[in-house]
């Protein structure tokens, strides 16, 4: 997700280190199809979490990137007449036909550069804090309080790395973007708006991601209880649960995402129409401006694109993360056994 993350970034309880093992018994290598989901894989290292998280983050943000580009444009409060779309499909078709085949992918390189380290730090921090706090609160058990605290702290690190990439990415995605490349965008923003412009939406991003993760976690756990009550390792149930949880969380937090987009892009036409000179800053000001320009419905601009983006991206993120975590841990265990 953002998850998530959203995930990005997401706090859909990434499988933790699993139930505690007896001190006298060495953990057996996990067997595909027999281990419980929450215990896969047991004892993964910090490097494994970081590697799996980095791959998952890059996959999550790049596979669905064209839809993310559409979402950014659909959240524009006063779009150009040539950039008004009724659906995601219509938007993608129109962008490709009028602006070129590769236009929906503009800015994907800076997203990949940010998503790798951001998600590596997120998953590593989450897994480490989750285990430590769970050991303290429930003596090795799975504590929802520990999961929530770990996810919140991990989000601080994730967004600190990802926010500048988001600013550049969204400016590159906008219709008639004046920036020819990622580097020119970075240089122009730094020269004209200062370094603070890259973190103008940071507080809004955090305000959005914390409830996003809470809603995602609750929905995910509820769905797992319904379709996978025994918590077996069942990729299909994890994909379905993650997709539904991502959709619910995305829809609920769309107002904050619209405000974040406004702060990141600083739409000149929209701001000048409400007599705002200079640069808009602060979540409260963003909320007021969105309401002035679009009323209540303005807070839900692009909700369709956001949900369509979040469902598969969340499913992809957790599937890839779990696969690589399982694969890398299994490989290490097999290597130790063969020595």
Image (cartoon, rainbow, N blue to C red):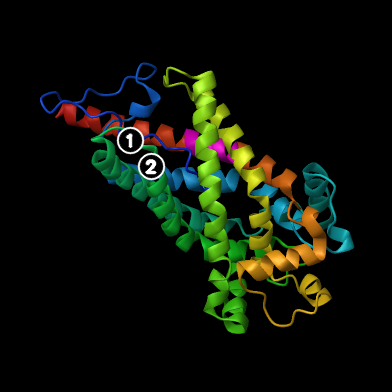
Q: Which one is in front in this view, the residue at disc 1 or the one at disc 2?
A: 2
130, above or below 152, in the image: above
Q: Residue at x 53, y 65 (%)?
A: 202
Along the viewing direction, whichever of 227 and 4 lies nearer the viewer: 227
In this rendering, the count of numbered labels is: 2
Coordinates of residue 335 in the picture (x, y in percent) = 22, 31
Q: Secondary structure at mark 1?
A: helix
> Which residue is at 59% across, 34% downward?
243
Q: Is residue 4 visible?
A: no
The residue beneath circle 1 is 328
In the picture, the quarter occupied by the C terminus is top left
Residue sitting farthest toward the left: 24
Residue annotated with mark 2: 145
Q: Position of residue 298 (x, y in %)?
A: 78, 57
Residue 243: within the magenta? Answer: no
Magenta region: 312-319
């Amino acid at each position: 997700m953002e998850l998530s993350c959203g995930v990005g970034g997401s706090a859909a309880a990434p499988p933790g280190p699993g139930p505690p093992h007896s001190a006298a018994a060495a953990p057996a290598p996990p067997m595909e199809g027999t281990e419980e989901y929450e215990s896969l894989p047991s004892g993964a290292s910090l490097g494994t979490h970081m590697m799996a998280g980095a791959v998952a983050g890059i996959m999550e943000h790049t596979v669905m990137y064209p839809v993310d580009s559409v979402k950014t444009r659909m959240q524009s409060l006063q779009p150009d007449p040539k950039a008004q779309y009724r659906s995601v499909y219509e938007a993608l078709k129109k962008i490709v036909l009028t602006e070129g085949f590769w236009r929906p992918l503009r800015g994907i390189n800076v997203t990949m550069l940010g998503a790798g380290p951001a998600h590596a730090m997120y998953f590593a921090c989450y897994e480490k804090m989750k285990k430590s706090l769970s050991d303290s609160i429930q003596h090795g058990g799975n504590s929802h309080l520990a999961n929530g605290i770990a996810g919140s702290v991990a989000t601080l690190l994730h967004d600190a790395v990802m926010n500048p990439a988001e600013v550049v990415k969204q400016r590159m995605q906008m219709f008639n973007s004046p920036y020819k490349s990622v580097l020119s965008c970075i240089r122009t923003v730094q020269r004209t708006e200062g370094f603070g412009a890259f973190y103008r939406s940071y507080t809004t991003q955090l305000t959005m991601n914390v409830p996003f993760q809470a809603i995602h976690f609750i929905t995910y756990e509820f769905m797992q209880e319904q379709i996978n009550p025994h918590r077996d390792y069942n990729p299909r149930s994890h994909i379905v649960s993650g997709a539904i949880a991502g959709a619910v969380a995305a829809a609920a937090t769309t107002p904050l995402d619209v405000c974040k987009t406004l702060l990141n892009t600083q739409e000149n036409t929209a701001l000048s129409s409400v007599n705002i000179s200079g640069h808009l800053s602060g979540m409260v000001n963003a909320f007021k401006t969105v309401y002035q320009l679009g009323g209540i419905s303005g807070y839900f601009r692009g909700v369709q694109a956001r949900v369509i983006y979040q469902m598969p991206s969340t499913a992809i993120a957790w599937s890839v993360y779990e696969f690589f975590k399982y694969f890398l841990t299994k490989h290490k265990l097999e290597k130790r056994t063969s020595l």
